Image: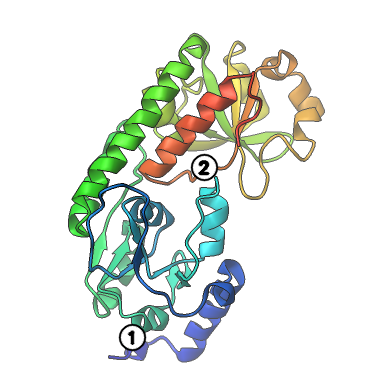
Amino acid sequence: MRLSSRGESRRLWGARLAVGMLLGGLSSRGAVARLSTVPLLGGASSTDERLVVLDWGLAETVLALGVTPLGVPAPGWYDRYVGGGETMPSGVTNVGLLFAPNFELIQSLAPSRILITPGLTAARSALDRIAPTDSFTVFRPGADVLDHAREETWRLADRIGRARSRDALFAGVDRSLDRARRAVAESASRPLYLVTVIDDRHVRIHGRESLYGGVLTRLGLRNAWKRPTLGGVATVALDALLEEPEAGLVTIATPFGGGLGGGHAQGPFWSILPFAREGRVYETAPVLANGGLPSVARFARLLARALDTTKGHAR
């Protein structure tokens, strides 16, 4: 079956593929991928599923369950956002952009199942013509953000036949959280702001409903940001961080910087803030903000390292 009947011209799909190649490095990864299992978790059962995964949070979860997808959007950018050396295996096909997948390329991979988030609901009927398509939300902002990630991972693992791998993943995440909770126990008395630096006057702040905020709460730490957020985040000027003068500041870097680099921390607006003057600023490497349980475990590890000043900045 050809998808041109949906009213999309070949020229449009070709343009989308060209952009996807530019962002994700399609030529370096190959146009055709093989499905394989990865020995990330001991005792993982085999699966016949040939998956195309159209979300990075779902992709990192699938990988952690021991399955390498046939294709994901912009795998080169996935590598930058997920961080920590947890790169997409070579041979995974770039299937376009996160919200503009290349339908004809996906069809050529002959997947047995396609995984999406609700953000691609409008495309689901077209994807269903290629292969059965299932929607999951491993990240959903809210007070129960970590519990929801666990519930959706449970459901996802059942769908792709990875129950044994799921149990191992859960155990590994729980160990990471337990170790981090013990490591940060001495820091529990001081609230923390969680931010991504935008420029020398603004930050993107992460509230209690964000993935970062959920990890902070699970570790027994307090989020200094008490104002409402939209989906767990808000963009604010630096003076908003004066509301909790005793707080520490944790900056989460992005693939484009956004940490303490670029001279922002040396600017005049930063220098008057109590946490900057008194050395209560900590930094972590990038962590996927809308990721699943692997991102939860990664941020817990990095935060614990960052708060241990004897180890310096976490990477």
Eye-nearest disc, 2 or 1: 2
Q: Which residue is mark 1?
A: 6
Measured Cα–Cα span from mark 2 to mark 1: 37 Å
Q: Residues within 10 Å of mark 2 (few under 14, many from 20)?
A: many
Residue 52 in picture, x, y percent from top left = 35, 68
Q: Quadrant of residue 198?
A: top right
Secondary structure at numbered mark 2: loop
The residue positioned 53% from the left and 32% from the top of the image is 302
The residue positioned 30% from the left and 63% from the top of the image is 115
Q: Quadrant of residue 100?
A: bottom left
Q: Amino acid at mark 2?
A: Val
Q: Nearer the viewer, residue 295 or 37?
A: 37
Q: Amino acid at mark 1?
A: Arg
The N terminus is located in which quarter?
bottom left
Secondary structure at numbered mark 1: helix
The disc label shown at residue 287, or none: 2
Residue 130 in picture, x, y percent from top left = 27, 79
